[in-house]
Each structure stands twice: as structure tokens, then as C-alpha cells.
Amino acid sequence: MRQNIVAGNWKMNKTLQEGIDLAKEVNQKAGNTTLNCKVVLGTPFIHITEAVKAVDKNRVSISAQNCADKESGAYTGEVSAAMVKSTGAEYVILGHSERRAYYGENEAILKEKTDLALKNELKPIFCIGEVLSERESEKHFEVVKKQVEESLFHLSTEEFSNIVLAYEPVWAIGTGKTATTEQAQEMHAFIRNLVAEKYGKETAENVSILYGGSCKPDNAKELFSNPDVDGGLIGGASLKADDFMGIIDAF
Ligand code: PGA
């Protein structure tokens, strides 16, 4: 069954205590409303253990924002998928455009990370999306197709059923410039069709495809009303409980 999901991506924000407070506040507010979507908080690694304790897992799930492309060993500063799993996190964001742009993560690296996440029973929230010049030169479909095919299409149907996709046009991230509802729906339908061609209609119908990029309480409802938009990956607006709840309440 396709699931609606609103996932926060805190990025590199919040001290430990601030993070615990935010997780608690979201958990409490989520308990006071009828949730029509799954709620996920993507916290920095150092917050995960405490965030898992701070929330009711029937209400709020915790996600890492990354994991290593190696299993274990002499990789100073890295955090493995097994380590993430051992904290109680259920998800891991992979392939965020900031990781691709600033840390050189390419399709091959992301394929390794995806395999390790799945092997350790984490659900990847796998990010894809074009930069502005690619959209302006009308290469956006081609770019997204390559990202999906080269990092994910080696998976079996069963493995793929654990993937959540997040379409995040890079030009919309943190810029206040949201994709129009037509742009979002068009790309989400394109992605679902790619999945259908590879894995069949049933798998495609069941995969959740989130939109990310300046999603806010005042535009979430319109974006989520599209038939192929199954929720959002939220950066800036996930840092304040009320803004985040405003997006959750759009469902
Ligand atoms: P934004 O970030 O909501 O601040 O645009 C989204 C993201 O990068 O996941």
C-alpha cells in the first residue's frame, strides 16, 4: 500500500538538547491530531539515539541523513548502516543533492549505500532531482532517469519495495522557489512510470514519491493534492514544530 509520508530533514542544525526538544515537541503535537501520513524526523547522527527515545514510534519514526558506503572498518568519521540501525532509526536519507554536490556522492557510491541500508533493514529515502541548468536545457527527465536507474534498478522487486523516493529539484531547495504543482506532478508521474516499466504496475502504484524543495505549510496542500505526490521531504520548515505540523496537517 502506498503510504503518505512527511519527513523532516534537519540537515546540520540543532545542538543535541535543541534536537531532543524539537523531537519531543513534534511527538507531542502529533499525538494531539489525527495523522493521515507517516511522520519521520531526519536528524543528525548524534541526535538519533535520543530522538528515538523522545518519540512514540507508532507516531513518529526517526531517520538518519546518510550512511557509509562501506560495511565497517578503518573509515574515520564515517557511520555505517549497521550502526544507524542499532540506534533504532528506521529510515536513512540517501543521495540528497547536498551530499551529491558537496561530498562527491555519485550513482555508484549511492548504489553501495542503498545496498548496505537495505541489508541492514533501513528504509532509504532516496533523493533525486535536477539542477537549474539541467531543467533550463530540458534535460531534467533524462537526469532523474539516470539517477534512478544507476543507483536503484539493480534491486530485486522485493528490495525495491522498501525504497521511498524523494524528488527534489535542486533549484527549489532552500531557495523559497517551489516547483509548480504541474511541474511536481509531471515529474512524479514520470518517475512512477519508470518504476512501472522496470518493476511492474503494482510496485509502481505502491512506491511513495515525496516532493522536496521549499515545501511550506501554505503550499503543502496544493502539492500533496497531486495524484502522484505522496508527501514531502522538508528542510527549513521542519526546524520549527508548528511549521512542520502545518505540513503534516495538509493531509
Ligand atoms: P527545503 O529543503 O525544504 O529547506 O527547501 C528540502 C531538502 O533539502 O530536503
Image (tube, rainbow, N blue to C red):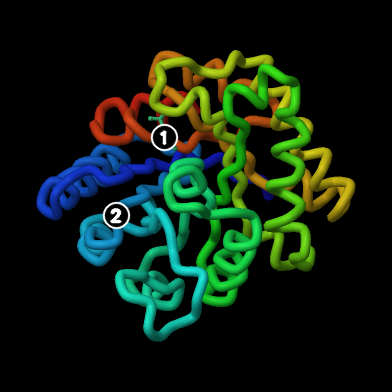
The amino acid pointed to by label 1 is Ile
| Residue 166 higher or lower than 71, as above or below | above
Task: Estimate how packed mark 1 is, as few (under 14), some (14 to 19) or many (20 or more) residues with alpha carbons within 10 Å.
Answer: many
Q: Is residue 248 left or right of residue 69?
A: left
Query: In this rendering, would 242 be left or right of 189?
Result: left
Q: Position of residue 113 (x, y in %)?
A: 55, 66
Q: Quadrant of ligand 1?
A: top left
Q: Hey, which quadrant is residue 62 in on the image? A: bottom left
Label 2: element kind = loop
| Image location of residue 67, percent across then percent down | 44, 65
| Residue at the farthest bottom position | 73
- Which element type, helix, strand or loop, lies under badge 1? strand
Beta carbon of the mark 2 residue lies under 8 A of ligand 1 = no
Note whether ligand 1 is within 8 Å of mark 1. yes
Mark 2 crowdedness (10 Å alpha carbons): few <14, some 14-19, many ≥20 = many
Identify the residue at image location x=72%, y=20%: 137
Residue 100 position, x and y percent, is: 51, 47
Quadrant of the rendered image containing residue 124 = bottom right
Q: Are marks 1 and 2 in contact (CB under 8 Å)?
A: no
Residue at figure coordinates x 65%, y 61% from the top left: 108
| 5, above or below 51, in the image | above
| Among numbered discs 1 and 2, the one appearing first in the sequence | 2
Q: Give the number of the mark in front: 1 or 2.
A: 2
Figure check: 210 above or below 220: below
Amino acid type, callout 2: Pro
Q: From mark 1 to mark 2, how far is it between C-alphas?
A: 14 Å
Residue topped by disc 1: 234
Q: Residue 3: give x, y in percent of width and height.
A: 60, 45
- Res. 182 image quadrant: top right
Residue drawn 67% across the image and 22% down it:
135
Residue tagged 2: 44
